[in-house]
Amino acid sequence: MTLRRADCEALDRADPLRPVRERFALPPGVIYLDGNSLGAMPKAAHERVNAALGQWSGDLISGWNIHGWIDLHERVGAKIGRLIGAEAGETIAGDSTSINLFKLLAAALQLNPKRRVVLSERDNFPTDLYIAEGLIRHLGQGHELRLAAPDEIADEITDDVAVVMLTHVNYRTGRMYDMAALTAAAQARGALTLWDLAHSAGAVPVDLAAANADFALGCGYKFLNGGPGAPAFLYAARRHHAAMQPVLTGWFGHAAPFAFEPSWRPADGIVKLAVGTPPILGLAALEAGVDLMLEASMAELRCKSLKQAEVFAALMAQEVGGFGFQSASPDDPAMRGSQLCFQHENGWPIMRALISRNVIGDFRSPGILRFGFTPLYLGFTELWDAVATLRDIMAAKSWDRPEHHARARVT
Ligand SMILES: *Cc1c(COP(=O)(O)O)cnc(C)c1O
């Protein structure tokens, strides 16, 4: 059946999430298919950040007490926890995804001291692998980073594996692991699990408690719409709190930071994984994004995201089927996050040409065009218009202009 633009307009009219778009500040005429990389700005972020600036100018250092800045990272972390099925007191916001990975991997290795292998996916997001390499080198205890293909992970959980460290939804292909099944498999063989939720939090239903996950972390600026460089978050299951020993023992993880004792003592619970002064302006913006996400139901978001992927894939086949795009995402929607990607030998100039026409996706080496679906603010008619623009670019070969071949630093 041919999909017409009118069909997409009808889907928009029937979309219960349609009004939420008005809560975002988006530039007119832009079709934004990159909210998986940097989420759009909630209008409330303006107000929240302005309010925090006013607190700073008006109350100076007193703001830490009177505006509750001192535990804002715990409060925002707790809200994120509700989005990912964590229990109260198991999550905290702050630091970057990379730093949180370092902290949690170190804690996990220390909790499983007889084993020496960190098992991960070869195509994991590079920073995750780099951080693991650096930590292993630093520990100097003969740990090994073992990399496998997604289908091989379960079989590679041998009895020397200390931690299975995976990104739940692959940043490139969108392939999603069965978190509960792999966690159970790992635990049955004596390994701990560490899940990176960078492309999951706010994108797909996540239930850390139901999956019995050990550790997790994720990103604030992708589907949570926390703004560029937003604080990240981390999770540790309560059963590990007493035994885990932070490697970055900063004063915000101390039992009594303002006692200024000469030696470190752990705070209770998840707070022991905090390190330094929380970034209040960044947390203010992140809280706006998280609050907006909490208003929607994750089931409703997932339902729209799956429909958007289905429509987009159908339009790609219908409109640009003859132009050499190969789907590089799993066919089964249950095994995908909230994005689709396509391989094309001219992926880079094609994406540049699309962006020059206000259709913003992104490019991931080698040759992958990536399109993210953010149901809070993306409409179905925009999907139609995006693919129609791609069809124009392919038919006219306008992607082949020299300006589209130049490489940028950020892709
Ligand atoms: C986006 C992303 C990161 C980003 O890490 P930063 O520390 O925020 O730069 C890390 N890991 C994965 C899997 C990601 O998708």
Image (tube, grey):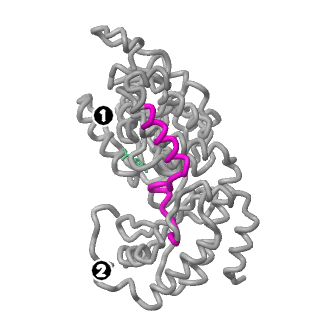
Local crowd size for mark 1, using a 10 Å CA cut-off: few (<14), some (14–19), many (≥20): some
In-front residue for pair 92/115: 92
* Residue ranking furthest to the bottom: 396
> In the picture, which quadrant includes the N terminus?
bottom right
Range covered by the magenta-colored residues:
29-55
The CA span between labels 1 and 2 is 46 Å
> Who's the residue at 59% across and 56% down the image?
335
Answer whether residue 264 is visible to the viewer in this image: yes
Q: Where is residue 349 in the image (x, y as percent from the top left)?
A: 36, 77
Whole-percent x, y for residue 207 in the image:
62, 39
Label 1: which secondary element: loop
Q: Which amino acid does label 1 sit on?
A: His
Q: Which of 296 and 148 is in front in this view?
A: 296
- Left or right: residue 250 compared with residue 185: left
Determine crowd level at label 2: few under 14, some 14-19, many 20+ residues with C-alpha closer than 10 A.
Answer: few
- Of residues 105 and 312, which is closer to you in this image? 312
Across and down, in percent, residue 2 comes to: 69, 83
Q: Which amino acid does label 2 sit on?
A: Glu
- Give the vertical position of 39 relative to 54 (above or below): below
* Residue lying furthest front: 58
- Residue picked out by circle 1: 143
Residue denoted by label 2: 403
Identify the residue at horizontal 69%, vertical 47% (top origin): 297
Q: In this view, does 80 lie to the left or right of 135?
A: right
**Figure quadrant of residue 380:** bottom right
Query: Up-down: is 153 above or below 85?
Result: below
**Residue 56 x, y percent position in the rendering:** 40, 32
